[in-house]
Amino acid sequence: MSILAPVLATEAPLDAEVVGGGAGLVQAELAGNAVDAGPIARLSYRARLRGLVRRAARLILSATDWLFGAAALVVGLSFLSTYPLLQMLSLGYLLEVSGRIARTGRLRDGFVGVRKASRLGSIAFGTWAVLLPLRFVSSVATSARLIDPGSRAARGWSVALVVLTVLAVAHIVGACWRGGRLRHFVWPRPVRLVKSIFRRGAYAKARDAVWSFLVGLRLPYYFWLGVRGFAGGLIWLFVPISLIAAGQRVPPLGFLGAVALMWVVFYLPFLQARFAAQNRFRAHFELREVRRLFRKAPVMFLLSLLCTLLFAIPLYLLKVEIVPREAAWLPSLVFVTFIFPARLLTGWSCGRAMRRPKNRNFFLRQAARLAMLPIVAFYVLIVFLTQFTSWHGVASLYEQHAFLVPVPFLGL
Protein backbone atom coordinates (compact mmCIF):
# COMPACT_ATOMS: atom_id res chain seq x y z
CA MET A 1 0.00 0.00 0.00
CA SER A 2 2.85 2.29 0.80
CA ILE A 3 4.40 1.49 -2.52
CA LEU A 4 1.23 2.36 -4.54
CA ALA A 5 0.37 5.50 -2.60
CA PRO A 6 2.79 7.82 -4.43
CA VAL A 7 1.50 6.56 -7.74
CA LEU A 8 -2.13 7.07 -6.81
CA ALA A 9 -1.31 10.45 -5.40
CA THR A 10 0.23 11.55 -8.63
CA GLU A 11 -2.51 10.04 -10.85
CA ALA A 12 -5.43 11.60 -9.01
CA PRO A 13 -4.54 15.22 -9.75
CA LEU A 14 -3.90 14.32 -13.35
CA ASP A 15 -7.33 12.70 -13.75
CA ALA A 16 -8.99 15.62 -12.06
CA GLU A 17 -7.20 18.04 -14.29
CA VAL A 18 -8.26 16.18 -17.38
CA VAL A 19 -11.84 15.78 -16.24
CA GLY A 20 -12.19 19.24 -14.87
CA GLY A 21 -10.51 20.97 -17.78
CA GLY A 22 -12.13 18.96 -20.55
CA ALA A 23 -14.22 21.82 -21.71
CA GLY A 24 -11.19 24.05 -21.88
CA LEU A 25 -9.28 21.53 -23.91
CA VAL A 26 -12.18 21.18 -26.32
CA GLN A 27 -12.47 24.93 -26.66
CA ALA A 28 -8.73 25.23 -27.25
CA GLU A 29 -8.90 22.53 -29.92
CA LEU A 30 -11.80 24.23 -31.66
CA ALA A 31 -10.00 27.51 -31.53
CA GLY A 32 -6.94 25.92 -33.11
CA ASN A 33 -9.08 24.41 -35.87
CA ALA A 34 -10.64 27.79 -36.48
CA VAL A 35 -7.21 29.30 -36.88
CA ASP A 36 -6.08 26.56 -39.31
CA ALA A 37 -9.33 26.50 -41.35
CA GLY A 38 -8.21 29.35 -43.62
CA PRO A 39 -5.19 27.62 -45.21
CA ILE A 40 -7.07 24.34 -45.46
CA ALA A 41 -9.97 26.03 -47.26
CA ARG A 42 -7.57 27.79 -49.59
CA LEU A 43 -5.82 24.51 -50.36
CA SER A 44 -9.16 22.80 -50.99
CA TYR A 45 -10.24 25.66 -53.29
CA ARG A 46 -6.98 25.47 -55.22
CA ALA A 47 -7.28 21.71 -55.57
CA ARG A 48 -10.83 22.02 -56.90
CA LEU A 49 -9.72 24.76 -59.28
CA ARG A 50 -6.84 22.64 -60.58
CA GLY A 51 -9.21 19.71 -61.07
CA LEU A 52 -11.66 21.91 -62.94
CA VAL A 53 -8.88 23.25 -65.17
CA ARG A 54 -7.68 19.70 -65.91
CA ARG A 55 -11.18 18.54 -66.81
CA ALA A 56 -11.70 21.58 -69.05
CA ALA A 57 -8.35 20.97 -70.75
CA ARG A 58 -9.19 17.31 -71.31
CA LEU A 59 -12.58 18.26 -72.72
CA ILE A 60 -11.04 20.80 -75.10
CA LEU A 61 -8.39 18.32 -76.24
CA SER A 62 -11.00 15.61 -76.74
CA ALA A 63 -13.24 17.94 -78.75
CA THR A 64 -10.29 19.10 -80.85
CA ASP A 65 -9.28 15.49 -81.50
CA TRP A 66 -12.86 14.65 -82.51
CA LEU A 67 -13.11 17.60 -84.91
CA PHE A 68 -9.75 16.74 -86.42
CA GLY A 69 -10.91 13.14 -86.82
CA ALA A 70 -14.12 14.24 -88.55
CA ALA A 71 -12.13 16.38 -91.00
CA ALA A 72 -9.64 13.55 -91.59
CA LEU A 73 -12.55 11.17 -92.17
CA VAL A 74 -14.10 13.37 -94.87
CA VAL A 75 -10.74 13.85 -96.58
CA GLY A 76 -10.02 10.11 -96.42
CA LEU A 77 -13.40 9.24 -97.94
CA SER A 78 -12.71 11.77 -100.69
CA PHE A 79 -9.40 10.10 -101.54
CA LEU A 80 -11.01 6.66 -101.53
CA SER A 81 -13.75 7.86 -103.87
CA THR A 82 -11.25 8.67 -106.63
CA TYR A 83 -10.06 5.06 -107.08
CA PRO A 84 -12.30 2.55 -108.87
CA LEU A 85 -12.34 -0.32 -106.37
CA LEU A 86 -11.75 1.73 -103.24
CA GLN A 87 -14.85 3.74 -104.11
CA MET A 88 -16.88 0.93 -102.59
CA LEU A 89 -15.26 1.59 -99.22
CA SER A 90 -16.50 5.17 -99.33
CA LEU A 91 -20.01 4.14 -100.34
CA GLY A 92 -20.02 1.36 -97.75
CA TYR A 93 -19.10 3.78 -94.99
CA LEU A 94 -21.86 6.23 -95.96
CA LEU A 95 -24.37 3.38 -96.01
CA GLU A 96 -23.18 2.20 -92.60
CA VAL A 97 -23.69 5.72 -91.26
CA SER A 98 -27.38 5.72 -92.15
CA GLY A 99 -27.81 2.08 -91.19
CA ARG A 100 -26.32 2.48 -87.73
CA ILE A 101 -28.48 5.51 -86.95
CA ALA A 102 -31.54 3.59 -88.16
CA ARG A 103 -30.66 0.72 -85.81
CA THR A 104 -30.02 2.81 -82.71
CA GLY A 105 -32.13 5.90 -83.33
CA ARG A 106 -29.30 8.16 -82.12
CA LEU A 107 -27.80 10.71 -84.47
CA ARG A 108 -24.41 10.66 -82.70
CA ASP A 109 -23.95 6.99 -83.59
CA GLY A 110 -23.58 7.93 -87.24
CA PHE A 111 -20.08 9.34 -86.74
CA VAL A 112 -18.42 5.96 -87.06
CA GLY A 113 -14.67 5.66 -86.50
CA VAL A 114 -13.95 9.34 -85.93
CA ARG A 115 -11.30 8.60 -83.31
CA LYS A 116 -9.58 6.08 -85.57
CA ALA A 117 -9.69 8.59 -88.42
CA SER A 118 -8.04 11.11 -86.09
CA ARG A 119 -5.18 8.70 -85.47
CA LEU A 120 -4.71 7.96 -89.18
CA GLY A 121 -4.97 11.65 -90.00
CA SER A 122 -2.36 12.47 -87.36
CA ILE A 123 0.04 9.94 -88.85
CA ALA A 124 -0.53 11.24 -92.38
CA PHE A 125 -0.24 14.90 -91.43
CA GLY A 126 2.74 14.32 -89.14
CA THR A 127 4.57 12.33 -91.80
CA TRP A 128 3.89 15.03 -94.38
CA ALA A 129 5.22 17.73 -92.04
CA VAL A 130 8.37 15.75 -91.19
CA LEU A 131 9.12 15.17 -94.88
CA LEU A 132 8.91 18.86 -95.78
CA PRO A 133 12.58 19.64 -94.88
CA LEU A 134 13.59 16.45 -96.67
CA ARG A 135 11.89 17.62 -99.86
CA PHE A 136 13.69 20.95 -99.68
CA VAL A 137 17.11 19.35 -99.14
CA SER A 138 16.41 16.87 -101.93
CA SER A 139 15.61 19.66 -104.40
CA VAL A 140 18.75 21.60 -103.42
CA ALA A 141 20.93 18.49 -103.70
CA THR A 142 19.48 17.74 -107.15
CA SER A 143 20.16 21.29 -108.30
CA ALA A 144 23.73 21.13 -106.96
CA ARG A 145 24.44 17.91 -108.84
CA LEU A 146 23.05 19.37 -112.05
CA ILE A 147 25.11 22.57 -111.77
CA ASP A 148 28.43 21.06 -110.65
CA PRO A 149 28.34 17.29 -110.11
CA GLY A 150 31.78 16.93 -108.53
CA SER A 151 31.81 20.02 -106.34
CA ARG A 152 32.07 20.08 -102.56
CA ALA A 153 28.61 21.64 -102.33
CA ALA A 154 27.07 18.80 -104.32
CA ARG A 155 28.75 16.18 -102.12
CA GLY A 156 27.78 18.05 -98.95
CA TRP A 157 24.14 18.32 -99.93
CA SER A 158 24.11 14.64 -100.89
CA VAL A 159 25.49 13.66 -97.48
CA ALA A 160 23.01 15.99 -95.77
CA LEU A 161 20.19 14.35 -97.74
CA VAL A 162 21.23 10.87 -96.58
CA VAL A 163 21.56 11.93 -92.94
CA LEU A 164 18.28 13.81 -92.96
CA THR A 165 16.52 10.84 -94.59
CA VAL A 166 17.72 8.50 -91.85
CA LEU A 167 16.67 10.95 -89.14
CA ALA A 168 13.26 11.55 -90.75
CA VAL A 169 12.53 7.84 -91.08
CA ALA A 170 13.63 7.22 -87.50
CA HIS A 171 11.46 10.09 -86.29
CA ILE A 172 8.39 8.86 -88.17
CA VAL A 173 8.83 5.28 -86.98
CA GLY A 174 9.37 6.46 -83.41
CA ALA A 175 6.28 8.67 -83.48
CA CYS A 176 4.16 5.82 -84.83
CA TRP A 177 5.65 3.48 -82.20
CA ARG A 178 4.58 5.84 -79.42
CA GLY A 179 1.01 6.08 -80.70
CA GLY A 180 1.01 8.18 -83.86
CA ARG A 181 -0.58 11.30 -82.39
CA LEU A 182 0.44 14.79 -83.44
CA ARG A 183 2.21 15.46 -80.16
CA HIS A 184 4.44 12.43 -80.79
CA PHE A 185 5.62 14.03 -84.04
CA VAL A 186 6.18 17.41 -82.38
CA TRP A 187 7.94 16.13 -79.23
CA PRO A 188 10.00 13.01 -80.03
CA ARG A 189 11.47 12.16 -76.54
CA PRO A 190 14.12 9.73 -77.84
CA VAL A 191 15.24 8.45 -74.41
CA ARG A 192 11.78 7.25 -73.46
CA LEU A 193 11.36 5.84 -76.98
CA VAL A 194 14.53 3.73 -76.70
CA LYS A 195 13.48 2.44 -73.28
CA SER A 196 10.04 1.47 -74.56
CA ILE A 197 11.48 -0.30 -77.61
CA PHE A 198 13.87 -2.48 -75.59
CA ARG A 199 11.34 -3.26 -72.88
CA ARG A 200 10.46 -6.95 -72.65
CA GLY A 201 7.44 -7.83 -74.80
CA ALA A 202 7.34 -4.40 -76.45
CA TYR A 203 7.39 -5.79 -79.98
CA ALA A 204 4.57 -8.25 -79.37
CA LYS A 205 2.47 -5.56 -77.71
CA ALA A 206 3.02 -3.12 -80.59
CA ARG A 207 2.28 -5.84 -83.17
CA ASP A 208 -0.99 -6.79 -81.46
CA ALA A 209 -2.00 -3.14 -81.12
CA VAL A 210 -1.43 -2.47 -84.83
CA TRP A 211 -3.31 -5.61 -85.80
CA SER A 212 -6.23 -4.75 -83.52
CA PHE A 213 -6.35 -1.25 -84.98
CA LEU A 214 -6.39 -2.55 -88.56
CA VAL A 215 -9.05 -5.14 -87.77
CA GLY A 216 -11.12 -2.43 -86.06
CA LEU A 217 -11.25 -0.48 -89.31
CA ARG A 218 -13.53 -3.22 -90.74
CA LEU A 219 -12.42 -2.57 -94.31
CA PRO A 220 -13.76 -5.87 -95.77
CA TYR A 221 -17.15 -5.20 -94.18
CA TYR A 222 -17.40 -1.68 -95.63
CA PHE A 223 -16.22 -2.87 -99.04
CA TRP A 224 -18.80 -5.67 -99.24
CA LEU A 225 -21.53 -3.38 -97.94
CA GLY A 226 -20.62 -0.81 -100.59
CA VAL A 227 -20.62 -3.40 -103.39
CA ARG A 228 -24.08 -4.66 -102.47
CA GLY A 229 -25.41 -1.15 -101.92
CA PHE A 230 -24.09 -0.09 -105.31
CA ALA A 231 -25.66 -3.13 -106.97
CA GLY A 232 -29.02 -2.58 -105.30
CA GLY A 233 -29.10 1.10 -106.21
CA LEU A 234 -28.04 0.42 -109.79
CA ILE A 235 -30.80 -2.16 -110.19
CA TRP A 236 -33.37 0.47 -109.31
CA LEU A 237 -31.79 3.24 -111.38
CA PHE A 238 -30.76 1.35 -114.50
CA VAL A 239 -34.14 1.13 -116.25
CA PRO A 240 -35.30 4.74 -115.63
CA ILE A 241 -31.90 6.18 -116.55
CA SER A 242 -31.72 4.03 -119.68
CA LEU A 243 -35.16 5.25 -120.74
CA ILE A 244 -34.11 8.87 -120.20
CA ALA A 245 -30.96 8.24 -122.24
CA ALA A 246 -33.06 6.72 -125.02
CA GLY A 247 -35.26 9.79 -124.98
CA GLN A 248 -32.86 11.63 -127.27
CA ARG A 249 -33.99 9.38 -130.10
CA VAL A 250 -37.48 8.50 -128.89
CA PRO A 251 -38.85 11.38 -126.76
CA PRO A 252 -41.78 9.41 -125.26
CA LEU A 253 -39.26 7.00 -123.73
CA GLY A 254 -37.51 9.91 -122.09
CA PHE A 255 -40.76 11.10 -120.53
CA LEU A 256 -41.54 7.57 -119.33
CA GLY A 257 -38.06 7.29 -117.84
CA ALA A 258 -38.47 10.59 -116.00
CA VAL A 259 -41.73 9.42 -114.43
CA ALA A 260 -40.13 6.11 -113.46
CA LEU A 261 -37.13 7.91 -111.94
CA MET A 262 -39.46 10.08 -109.87
CA TRP A 263 -41.08 6.95 -108.45
CA VAL A 264 -37.67 5.40 -107.69
CA VAL A 265 -36.35 8.53 -105.98
CA PHE A 266 -39.29 8.48 -103.56
CA TYR A 267 -38.13 5.13 -102.15
CA LEU A 268 -34.44 4.56 -102.88
CA PRO A 269 -32.80 6.56 -100.04
CA PHE A 270 -34.91 4.79 -97.42
CA LEU A 271 -34.48 1.39 -99.04
CA GLN A 272 -30.72 1.83 -98.84
CA ALA A 273 -30.95 2.90 -95.19
CA ARG A 274 -32.97 -0.21 -94.32
CA PHE A 275 -30.54 -2.39 -96.28
CA ALA A 276 -27.61 -1.01 -94.29
CA ALA A 277 -29.49 -1.32 -91.00
CA GLN A 278 -30.43 -4.96 -91.54
CA ASN A 279 -27.50 -5.96 -93.79
CA ARG A 280 -29.85 -7.84 -96.11
CA PHE A 281 -29.70 -7.35 -99.86
CA ARG A 282 -33.39 -8.23 -100.16
CA ALA A 283 -34.22 -5.14 -98.08
CA HIS A 284 -33.55 -3.11 -101.24
CA PHE A 285 -36.89 -4.29 -102.61
CA GLU A 286 -39.19 -4.14 -99.57
CA LEU A 287 -41.32 -1.22 -100.64
CA ARG A 288 -44.12 -2.08 -98.25
CA GLU A 289 -41.83 -1.62 -95.26
CA VAL A 290 -40.77 1.82 -96.46
CA ARG A 291 -44.39 2.85 -96.88
CA ARG A 292 -45.12 1.57 -93.37
CA LEU A 293 -42.26 3.62 -91.93
CA PHE A 294 -43.37 6.69 -93.88
CA ARG A 295 -46.78 6.59 -92.24
CA LYS A 296 -45.11 6.85 -88.84
CA ALA A 297 -42.74 9.76 -89.62
CA PRO A 298 -43.90 11.58 -92.77
CA VAL A 299 -42.34 14.92 -91.85
CA MET A 300 -38.94 13.38 -91.14
CA PHE A 301 -39.09 11.50 -94.44
CA LEU A 302 -39.92 14.75 -96.22
CA LEU A 303 -36.98 16.58 -94.61
CA SER A 304 -34.51 13.79 -95.30
CA LEU A 305 -35.59 13.49 -98.94
CA LEU A 306 -35.37 17.26 -99.33
CA CYS A 307 -31.85 17.24 -97.85
CA THR A 308 -30.74 14.33 -100.05
CA LEU A 309 -31.94 15.87 -103.31
CA LEU A 310 -31.22 19.50 -102.50
CA PHE A 311 -27.60 18.74 -101.54
CA ALA A 312 -27.13 16.61 -104.65
CA ILE A 313 -28.26 19.25 -107.18
CA PRO A 314 -25.37 21.77 -106.81
CA LEU A 315 -22.85 18.97 -107.22
CA TYR A 316 -23.83 18.57 -110.87
CA LEU A 317 -21.97 21.81 -111.55
CA LEU A 318 -18.72 19.98 -110.80
CA LYS A 319 -19.49 17.47 -113.55
CA VAL A 320 -19.33 20.04 -116.35
CA GLU A 321 -15.61 19.55 -116.98
CA ILE A 322 -13.36 16.68 -116.00
CA VAL A 323 -10.46 17.33 -113.64
CA PRO A 324 -6.95 15.83 -113.73
CA ARG A 325 -6.30 12.63 -111.85
CA GLU A 326 -4.04 14.26 -109.25
CA ALA A 327 -6.74 16.80 -108.34
CA ALA A 328 -9.72 14.44 -108.51
CA TRP A 329 -10.04 14.28 -104.73
CA LEU A 330 -10.93 18.00 -104.52
CA PRO A 331 -14.40 17.72 -106.13
CA SER A 332 -14.88 14.43 -104.29
CA LEU A 333 -14.27 16.33 -101.06
CA VAL A 334 -17.23 18.56 -101.88
CA PHE A 335 -19.36 15.54 -102.81
CA VAL A 336 -18.67 13.72 -99.53
CA THR A 337 -19.22 16.90 -97.51
CA PHE A 338 -22.68 17.38 -99.03
CA ILE A 339 -23.79 13.74 -99.08
CA PHE A 340 -22.67 12.82 -95.56
CA PRO A 341 -25.34 14.90 -93.73
CA ALA A 342 -28.00 13.59 -96.10
CA ARG A 343 -27.12 10.03 -95.11
CA LEU A 344 -27.23 11.01 -91.44
CA LEU A 345 -30.71 12.51 -91.76
CA THR A 346 -32.05 9.58 -93.80
CA GLY A 347 -30.92 7.09 -91.18
CA TRP A 348 -32.34 9.27 -88.41
CA SER A 349 -35.75 9.45 -90.07
CA CYS A 350 -35.86 5.67 -90.47
CA GLY A 351 -34.74 5.18 -86.88
CA ARG A 352 -37.44 7.48 -85.51
CA ALA A 353 -40.09 5.77 -87.62
CA MET A 354 -39.04 2.32 -86.38
CA ARG A 355 -39.58 3.40 -82.78
CA ARG A 356 -42.97 5.02 -83.16
CA PRO A 357 -45.84 2.67 -82.35
CA LYS A 358 -48.61 4.56 -84.16
CA ASN A 359 -49.07 6.19 -87.53
CA ARG A 360 -49.42 9.93 -87.97
CA ASN A 361 -52.78 11.32 -88.95
CA PHE A 362 -54.02 11.00 -92.52
CA PHE A 363 -53.86 14.69 -93.42
CA LEU A 364 -50.24 15.04 -92.29
CA ARG A 365 -49.23 12.06 -94.41
CA GLN A 366 -50.98 13.39 -97.48
CA ALA A 367 -49.47 16.84 -97.00
CA ALA A 368 -45.97 15.30 -96.81
CA ARG A 369 -46.60 13.31 -100.00
CA LEU A 370 -47.79 16.40 -101.86
CA ALA A 371 -44.74 18.35 -100.65
CA MET A 372 -42.41 15.60 -101.88
CA LEU A 373 -43.83 15.66 -105.40
CA PRO A 374 -42.41 19.04 -106.62
CA ILE A 375 -39.07 18.35 -104.91
CA VAL A 376 -38.66 15.05 -106.72
CA ALA A 377 -39.93 16.51 -110.01
CA PHE A 378 -37.41 19.34 -109.87
CA TYR A 379 -34.57 16.91 -109.12
CA VAL A 380 -35.51 14.66 -112.05
CA LEU A 381 -35.63 17.72 -114.32
CA ILE A 382 -32.08 18.66 -113.28
CA VAL A 383 -30.93 15.08 -113.89
CA PHE A 384 -32.51 15.12 -117.33
CA LEU A 385 -30.75 18.36 -118.26
CA THR A 386 -27.32 17.20 -117.02
CA GLN A 387 -26.92 14.92 -120.03
CA PHE A 388 -26.43 18.09 -122.08
CA THR A 389 -24.02 19.81 -119.65
CA SER A 390 -21.90 17.05 -118.10
CA TRP A 391 -18.55 16.03 -119.49
CA HIS A 392 -19.56 12.44 -120.26
CA GLY A 393 -22.89 13.39 -121.82
CA VAL A 394 -25.52 10.67 -121.66
CA ALA A 395 -23.19 8.34 -119.76
CA SER A 396 -23.15 10.84 -116.89
CA LEU A 397 -26.77 9.95 -116.16
CA TYR A 398 -25.55 6.72 -114.58
CA GLU A 399 -23.28 8.64 -112.19
CA GLN A 400 -25.96 9.19 -109.55
CA HIS A 401 -23.84 10.45 -106.66
CA ALA A 402 -26.85 10.91 -104.37
CA PHE A 403 -27.45 7.14 -104.31
CA LEU A 404 -24.27 5.53 -105.62
CA VAL A 405 -20.58 6.45 -105.28
CA PRO A 406 -20.02 10.03 -104.01
CA VAL A 407 -17.78 11.08 -106.88
CA PRO A 408 -18.37 13.24 -109.97
CA PHE A 409 -16.85 10.79 -112.47
CA LEU A 410 -16.94 7.04 -112.00
CA GLY A 411 -14.16 6.55 -114.53
CA LEU A 412 -11.56 8.33 -112.37
Image: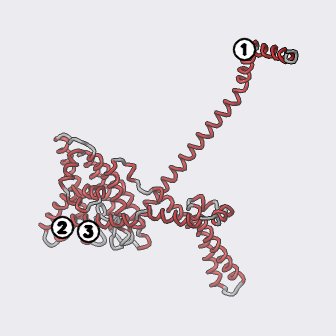
**Residue assigned mark 2:** 239
**Image quadrant of residue 275?**
bottom left
Rendered position, 128 above or below 38: below
What's the residue type where badge 3 is placed? Tyr
The alpha-carbon separation of the residues under discs 2 and 1 comes to: 99 Å
Where residue 406 appears, as percent x and y from the top left, is: 34, 63
- Whether residue 294 sits left or right of residue 187 in the image: it is left
The quarter of the image holding the C terminus is bottom left
The quarter of the image holding the N terminus is top right
Q: Nearer the N terminus, badge 3 or badge 2?
A: 2
Residue at image x 51%, y 53%?
Answer: 65
Q: Nearer the viewer, residue 280 or 338?
A: 280
* Visible residue check, residue 389: no
Rendered position, 203 above or below 156: above
**Residue assigned mark 1:** 23
Q: Nearer the N terminus, badge 1 or badge 3?
A: 1
Q: Nearer the N terminus, badge 2 or badge 1?
A: 1
Give SS at disc 3: helix
- Mark 2 burial class by Cα count in 10 Å: few <14, some 14-19, many 20+: some
**Residue assigned mark 3:** 398
Given this view, does label 2 or label 1 mark the residue nearer the observer?
1
Where residue 119 appears, as percent x and y from the top left, is: 51, 60
What's the residue type where badge 2 is placed? Val
- Mark 1 burial class by Cα count in 10 Å: few <14, some 14-19, many 20+: few
- Mark 3 burial class by Cα count in 10 Å: few <14, some 14-19, many 20+: some
Give SS at disc 1: helix
Residue at image x 30%, y 48%?
Answer: 351
- Whether residue 193 sits left or right of residue 117 in the image: it is right
